[in-house]
């Protein structure tokens, strides 16, 4: 596959909360901090809005990495959304590790609206981790494999 | 001398008859005998005469709490979706419940699917239920025509054989590692209470799998779930799965594909288990009803282990406490976060 070629760049889906991390990404931009262009940002109202369905659906559709980022604990615009999210993410990340999804594929972080530099650092480190892991193969639905199967049948 | 389960059956029949006759409840959920050896079927009894059909034995493997919300609905006077709630208290339903089933009822109460004051729990201490699959595996294809049950033995009979086996050897995995066999919610006590089991490690199967490498665990996952035919029996038999529209049936957006592709079946099982996080009481029904014998209980058991270790909560033990995922603590562990100290990356 073409992804295997040497100049492969990972696709990373980033779910960023509107109030902190998305603004943090914005600040990183206006402050001219450099970070890899591998992330595709999905803006969500709160990290508590990010459901396991979204994360798994992104993996299924071929994302090489996932980053979910929200406000620091105590700073949630909705008071407690990120506290609930933290419990759910802890369980999800353990479960994914349990079934053998490489640690580092699915990442979580807290980035506030004033942390433009930290946002760039998080994206840098997540991109490096995912690059080291290589293209995602587990839980990625391969349409061409399906089509081949259909042709054989 | 009657066996323990014969005594329990008699008591269930007597109590069910009494509750129905004096009008305390409108229905009793229990078990009736099945048409094959080692099978029973869930039974909703609505008249005192039918109480003789109720039985209790070592093969009661389905979680009866699954039938509770629908039975409660069925005894209410019929009304349209916009009609007001009828005056006065609504009819009650009695249900036989062991440790894990009663905990499922507690979860249903916490989640407002069931009103506590409409349920009469006939609490039965569980002695562990036998897995039909384990018995059949012992007899490798020879047809079992009848099974006689003693307190500690099973006498398995076929056309040309009759063998006695130890009951505990064929008890289901989840019952063998169970720590709360006695119901947490009891209105009418049936039989003798069973003491808490001191199990050195209830998560022994999960621990064994965690010892494997990431690749080993992935190999286990792909192999275990490869045979899934997406019949959704595990979902339908689960008392926690009551959503009117399940995520697998969602079309817009379609979270999980509906095909038998390994990724689709894998995602279904991951998400199904995840939706039971902090709610699963390890009743083992999903595993029991699976026609392919898939061990999907490993996923929920792993989640149970994490919920207990991270948040110190076991599902369904306290009716007045919130569910683990509907509450939080300021200092919940967060080592898994990419930019937190302890995660090995850029600690601040």
Image (cartoon, coloured by chain):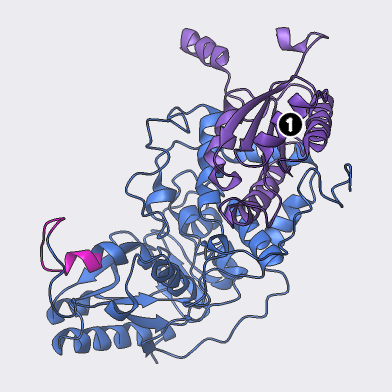
On screen, residue B317 above or below B145: below
**Residue B6 pos. (x, y %):** 36, 83
Identify the hue of chain A.
purple
A70 sits left or right of B265 in the view: right
Is residue B160 in the magenta section? no
Q: Quadrant of the N terminus of chain B?
A: bottom left
Q: Which residue is found at the position 35% from the left and 81% from the top?
A: B121
On screen, residue B92 above or below B300: below
Pick whichever, B91 or B213, lies toward us: B91
**The magenta segment:** B71-82
**Residue B262 pos. (x, y %):** 55, 29
User: Residue tagged by mark 1?
Assistant: A27
A136 sits left or right of A139 in the view: right
Q: Residue furthest front?
A: A30
Q: Which residue is found at the position 61% from the left and 75% from the top?
A: B179
Is residue B75 in the magenta section? yes
**Residue B246 pos. (x, y %):** 39, 44
A54 sits left or right of B31 in the view: right
Quarter where residue A100 is shown: top right
Identify the hue of chain B.
blue
On screen, residue B29 above or below B4: above
Pick whichever, B257 or B11, lies toward us: B257
Q: Decide: few, some or many residues near mark 1? Use Cα within 10 Å; few <14, some 14-19, many ≥20.
A: some
Q: Which residue is found at the position 56% from the left and 60% from the top?
A: B325
Any part of residue B163 in sight:
yes
């Amino acid at each position: 596959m073409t992804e295997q070629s040497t100049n492969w760049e990972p696709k990373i889906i980033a779910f960023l909360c509107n109030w902190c991390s998305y603004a943090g990404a914005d600040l990183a931009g206006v402050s001219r901090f450099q970070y890899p262009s591998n992330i595709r940002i999905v803006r969500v109202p709160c990290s508590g809005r990010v459901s396991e369905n979204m994360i798994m659906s992104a993996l299924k559709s071929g994302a090489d990495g996932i980053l979910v980022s929200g406000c620091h604990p105590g700073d949630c615009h909705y008071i407690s959304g990120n506290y609930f999210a933290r419990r759910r993410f802890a369980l999800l990340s353990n479960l994914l590790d349990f079934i053998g999804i490489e640690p580092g594929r699915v990442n979580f972080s807290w980035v506030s609206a004033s942390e433009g530099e930290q946002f760039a650092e998080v994206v840098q480190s997540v991109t490096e981790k995912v690059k080291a892991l290589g293209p995602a193969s587990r839980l990625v639905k391969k349409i061409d494999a399906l089509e081949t199967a259909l042709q054989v049948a | 001398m009657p066996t323990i389960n014969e005594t329990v059956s008699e008591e269930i029949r007597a109590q069910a008859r009494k509750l129905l006759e004096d009008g305390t409840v409108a229905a009793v959920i229990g078990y009736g005998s099945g048409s094959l050896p080692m099978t029973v079927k869930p039974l909703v009894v609505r008249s005192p005469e039918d109480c003789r059909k109720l039985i209790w034995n070592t093969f009661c493997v389905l979680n009866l709490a699954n039938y509770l919300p629908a039975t409660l609905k069925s005894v209410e006077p019929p009304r349209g979706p916009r009609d007001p709630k009828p005056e006065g208290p609504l009819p009650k339903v009695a249900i036989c419940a062991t440790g894990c089933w009663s905990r499922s009822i507690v979860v249903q109460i916490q989640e407002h699917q069931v009103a506590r004051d409409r349920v009469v729990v006939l609490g039965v201490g569980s002695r562990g239920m036998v897995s039909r699959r384990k018995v059949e595996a012992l007899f490798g294809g020879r047809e079992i025509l009848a099974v006689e049950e003693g307190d500690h033995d099973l006498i398995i009979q076929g056309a040309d054989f009759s063998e006695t086996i130890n009951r505990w050897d064929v008890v289901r995995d989840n019952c063998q590692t169970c720590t709360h066999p006695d119901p947490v919610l009891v209105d009418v006590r049936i039989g003798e209470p069973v003491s808490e089991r001191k199990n050195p490690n209830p998560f022994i199967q999960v621990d064994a799998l965690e010892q494997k490498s990431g690749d080993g665990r992935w190999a286990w996952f792909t192999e275990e779930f490869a045979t899934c035919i997406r019949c959704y029996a595990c979902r339908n038999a689960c008392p926690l799965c009551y959503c009117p529209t399940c995520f697998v049936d969602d079309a817009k957006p379609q979270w999980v594909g509906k095909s038998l592709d390994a990724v689709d079946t894998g995602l279904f099982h991951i998400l199904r288990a995840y939706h039971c996080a902090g709610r699963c009481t390890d009743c083992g029904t999903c595993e029991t009803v699976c026609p392919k014998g898939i061990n999907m209980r490993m996923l929920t058991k792993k989640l149970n282990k994490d919920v207990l270790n991270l948040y110190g909560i076991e599902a369904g033990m306290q009716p007045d406490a919130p569910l683990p995922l509907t509450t939080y603590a300021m200092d919940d562990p967060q080592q898994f976060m990419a930019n937190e100290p302890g995660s090995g990356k850029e600690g601040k």
